[in-house]
Image (spheres, helix red, strand yellow):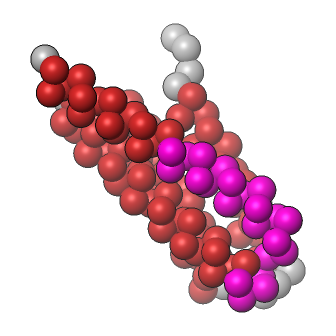
Amino acid sequence: MAESIVATKSYNFALRVIKLYKHLTQEQREFVLAKQVLRSGTSIGANVEEALGGQSKADFRYKLSIALKEARETSYWLRLLKDSEYIKPDAFKSIHGECEELIKILKSIILTSQQKENNS
């Protein structure tokens, strides 16, 4: 079975978030914001996985909408970490770019799924 692109990208993003969490807690000694970005950033992929195993099209869209909310929250925490100077602009640009890409992909999948259901 072919792997879902959004599942692969969200999993790889979660790995980056975990590395960022380690950096923030071990080198920056920042724990509160680090925990927030860890929770939301790893939740994206977990919700994508749940969506792929959804019991119905509505369940699929619901889980993806949660993944989208988590991605938007992660974007917020990443911006906050950059603006408070816990992460450097170059590191932010890279990881935030991935987060924005996930947001676009999730929006597109949700929209396409809604359109398909409305047309059937």
In this rendering, is residue 83 above or below 115?
Answer: below
- Magenta stretch contains residue 67: no
Left/right placement of residue 112 relative to residue 119 reads: right
* In the image, residue 87 above or below residue 44: below
Residue at 82% across, 64% down: 91
Residue at image coords 29%, 30%: 113
* For residue 113, above or below residue 36: above
Q: Quadrant of the C terminus?
A: top left
Numbered range of the magenta stretch: 83-104
Q: From this viewpoint, which residue is outermost toward the top?
A: 1
In the rendered image, residue 102 lying in the magenta stretch gets the answer yes
Residue 47 appears in view: yes
x, y percentage for residue 87? Answer: 79, 76
Image quadrant where residue 32 sits: bottom right
Q: Is residue 40 above or below residue 101?
A: below
In the figure, residue 57 lies in which quadrant?
Answer: top left
Instruction: Give the total number of marks visible in the rendering.
Output: 0
**Which of the 4 image quarters holds residue 59?**
top left
Residue, x 36% and y 44% (percent of image)? 64
Q: Nearer the viewer, residue 42 or 109?
A: 109
Residue in the picture at 76% in, 66% down: 92
Q: Position of residue 99 (x, y in %)?
A: 61, 54
- Place of residue 43 in the rendered image (x, y in percent of width and height, measured from the top left): 48, 56
The answer to whether residue 30 is seen in the rendering is: no
Secondary structure that dominates the magenta span: helix
